[in-house]
Every structure is written in structure tokens, then in C-alpha cells.
Amino acid sequence: MTDIEVLRLFRESGALLEGHFRLSSGLHSPGYLQCALVLQHPERAAALGRGIADASRAWGATVVLSPAMGGIVIGQEVGRALGVRAIFAERTDGTLSLRRGFSLAPGDRVLIVEDVLTTGTSTRETIDVAVAAGATVVGAASIMDRSGGRHGLDVPFAGLCPMVLPTHSPESCPLCASGLPVTKPGSRA
């Protein structure tokens, strides 16, 4: 799947939003990628999952681990395409952990799957969950890569679509300075 195909799916789904947004990272941006609008369509979710699976298949993952909430649907689709189980970590008191009876073992080769990667914080936290369980993290992947190559991950990374959307700290945000109200559409509080 090419980045042009990914962007087409986002545009057709109305998932590329413009305005003033506070991202999960805390940064502000004039653009937001609302992956849920794309992933609500099973055929589009499956196509994106196959794209990530194709980009990461050589890493030999035996399980997909995603951060809740945004990574759950795409993680499931990547797991389906790879033929491996797909689990997720969720926040309890601000910390990601495995719940609902999910577990990882030392023999597991884990692929971390996220919907959008901006700073890499959620991905790194999810990597930490896998490592704490004794598993080996073979790589990380996302549909959209907003990091501009600056994610700083210590594992191989595959992003289906690199997209540079400007980000600003709240203190230096020109949208805040202009008085434009900020919207928080993401899943992390």
C-alpha cells in the first residue's frame, strides 16, 4: 500500500481534519488524523492492516500489541493479516499495562502497532509493557507517521504514510496566539 493510497482512504473517509487540535502528545497542530473515521469501514481497516503486515512480515512477529484506544482496531487487522494473535495494553492510573487476561511470555516476538505516531511516546510505553513481560519487541509500525523520522525508537519502524503536519508547544502555538479554540479529539487524556 502506497502513501498515496493511504491518503486517499483518509480523504474519502473525512479523516484528515483541519483546525486547532491538542494531540495526545500535548502538542498543538492545525491538522489531525482521525483514524477512527477510516477504520470504521472494515474493508479499509483490512487494507491498512495488510499494508502494515506486508511492511513488517520479515520481522517474524508472533503477537501484535497495541496501545488502547487508537491502536486496537488496526492492531487486530495487522494480527489477522499476519495470522497471529492481537492484544492491547490499556491505561490504569495513567500507566499502560496488560489487563483482561492478556499476557506475553519470553518466547513472544512482539510487533507494536499504533494508528498514528507523532512523538513515539505511546509506542515507547507499549514497548516497555512488552519488555517488562519478558517478550522480545521485533519492531513497531503505524498507519501514519507524523514524526518526520524523529520518533527515536530503538526498534525497526514501518509507517505506511509519512505526513508532516506542523506541531507546536502550547506556549509557542500561533493558533493559540490568534485565539482559535483548541479541540482535543484523541483518546489519551
Image (spheres, helix red, strand yellow):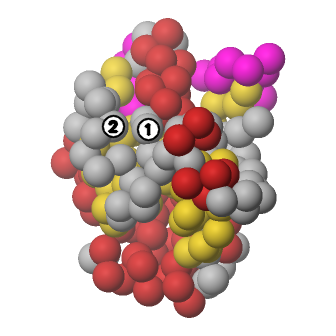
**Would residue 81 be visible to someone looking at this image?**
no
x and y percent of residue 83 in the render?
A: 43, 54
In this figure, which residue is indicated by the disc labeled 2? 151
At label 2, the amino acid type is His
SS of the residue under disc 2 = loop
x and y percent of residue 63 in the render?
A: 45, 38
Mark 2 Cα-neighbour bin, 10 Å: few <14, some 14–19, many ≥20: some
Q: Residue at x 44, y 26 (%)?
A: 124
Can you say which quadrant of the picture contains the N terminus? Answer: bottom left
At label 1, the amino acid type is Thr
x and y percent of residue 52 in the render?
A: 36, 59
Does the magenta run of residues contain 97? Answer: yes
Are circles 2 and 1 on residues that touch, CB within 8 Å?
yes
Stretch in magenta? 92-110
| Residue 8, numbered circle | none
| N-term mark: 2 or 1 | 1
Magenta-drawn stretch, dominant element (helix, strand or loop): loop
Q: Residue at x 34, y 21 (%)?
A: 136
**Would residue 127 be visible to someone looking at this image?**
yes
Looking at this rendering, what residue extends furthest in the left direction? Answer: 58
Looking at this rendering, what residue extends furthest in the bottom direction? Answer: 12
Does the magenta run of residues contain 161? Answer: no
Residue 76 vs residue 125, the one in the foreground: 125
In this figure, which residue is indicated by the disc labeled 1? 119
Residue 156 vs residue 20, the one in the foreground: 20
SS of the residue under disc 1 = loop
The count of marks equals 2
Q: Residue at x 28, y 39 (%)?
A: 150
Q: Residue at x 68, y 18 (%)?
A: 95
**Relative to 166, residue 86 above or below:** above
Please give left or right for residue 66 compared with residue 124 in the image: right
Please give left or right for residue 21 compared with residue 44 in the image: right
